[in-house]
Amino acid sequence: METHDFFLYLLIILLAARVFAELAVRMQAPSVIGELFAGVVLGPSLFGWVEPVEAIKLMAEIGIILLLFEVGLGTDVKRLVRSGLKSFVVAIAGFILPLLLGFALSYWLFGLSLLVSLFIGGTLTATSIGITVRVLTDLKRQQAPEGQIVLGAAVLDDVLGVVLLALLYEFSVGGGASLLSAGKVLLFVVAFFVLAPIAAKLISLIIRRFDAVSEIPGLLPTTIVALVLFFAWLANALGAPELLGGFAAGLALSRRFFLPLGIALRRDEDFACRIENQMKPIVYLFTPIFFVYVGLSLNLREIDWSSPFIWGFSLSLLTVAVIGKLVGAFLIKEPWAARWIIGVAMIPRGEVGLIFAELGRVSNIFNNEIYAGMVIVIALTTLLPPFIMKWFYAHYADHLQPIHEQRRDE
């Protein structure tokens, strides 16, 4: 396309993403819903003003990598350890149940292929820690017992989700699921997560040294973006999706990350904070492009809305997506109100779910109808839980007292 046309496309995408995100937040909805809706409005589903051209796709892929970098940067592994067994139970049940139920529903009820069914089940495992944290913070419940359980479980869900994404990527590239492919990816993931923090630490020492003597502003974001892109390239070279490299880079540079088995690297809190603060504007510039691109890639006009498949498919998966997360919360020993709020807080799929769905689409595993159904499910699971959580806290906050405190009061 012509350069001036690309500039116009980019201008429209950035402004529309911001306007619709602001409107969504004012309506008490997550900003990602507004950005997704901006793509639907601009794309072939409604006005058809912007096409998902290759240049926009490349910028969206940078947005995915930086988004996963931000998720990794915000991952608090120590929080997961502190929150203990309850977070582990909630996370594992909330990961396995949607995966199995989504796969079974797609494979046996709707007669979809093995790989498509695996992708659908994988998409339903995601939990958006960003949306969950934002709602808990707004309600001032992030430090409450149920808030700590949710945040610990969401951290583990993120890690498991990225590993599953790497597996599904390998299956999509290899043309099908196999134990050999799965073993290769799992071996790579383990090696990558052990070596990446060491490599990132060494590189960060060099970056810090140059940053201290550099007289030109902007060295830190430039070198960190270069590091993220290098990790993304390395991940692809080793047979995993590029976004796994972005996640690993963020995790390695996080001031809240430590190596397994008690081997810890010293952290410079101030340096890690500066990385986070200086990277945010770049992340905030590129990630909306990804969410708008998802909306642009969706053509709702091509879907036969009178077909019982799209309604049955979407409603069935929505039910599975909700139940799969709620069951995990009811397996732990907490007051009934706390279990409800933990389950609801784990439901939002948000940006992580959209990354799964987009990978399925670009790999030609999801056709337009299945892709649309998945986006509908992700949008509803992202949009509704914040409203339910706010209503629940307004009416049942007094019932959230932990069991051991109730017994002590008695």
Image: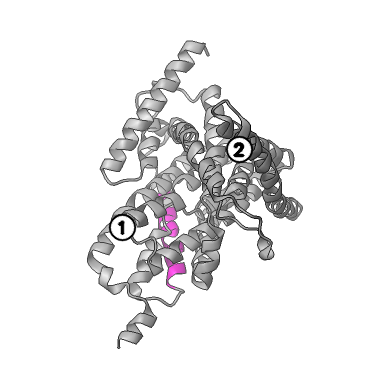
> How many numbered marks, from 0 up?
2
Type of amino acid under label 1: Leu
- Magenta span covers which residues? 314-330
Circles 1 and 2: CB atoms closer than 8 Å = no
Residue 359 lies in the magenta stretch? no
Q: Residue at x 44, y 30 (%)?
A: 296
Residue 355 drawn above or below residue 397: above
Residue 326 lies in the magenta stretch? yes
> Which of the two marks, 1 or 2, is nearer to us in this view?
1
Residue 94 drawn above or below residue 302: below
Image position of 306 (left or right of 360): left
- Residue 363's disc is 2
User: Considering only order in the chain, which callout, 2 or 1, is on the residue closer to the N terminus?
Assistant: 1
Taking depth in this image into account, of 173 and 266 the one nearest to the observer is: 266
Residue 205, image x and y in percent?
A: 67, 43
Residue 23, image x and y in percent?
A: 28, 37
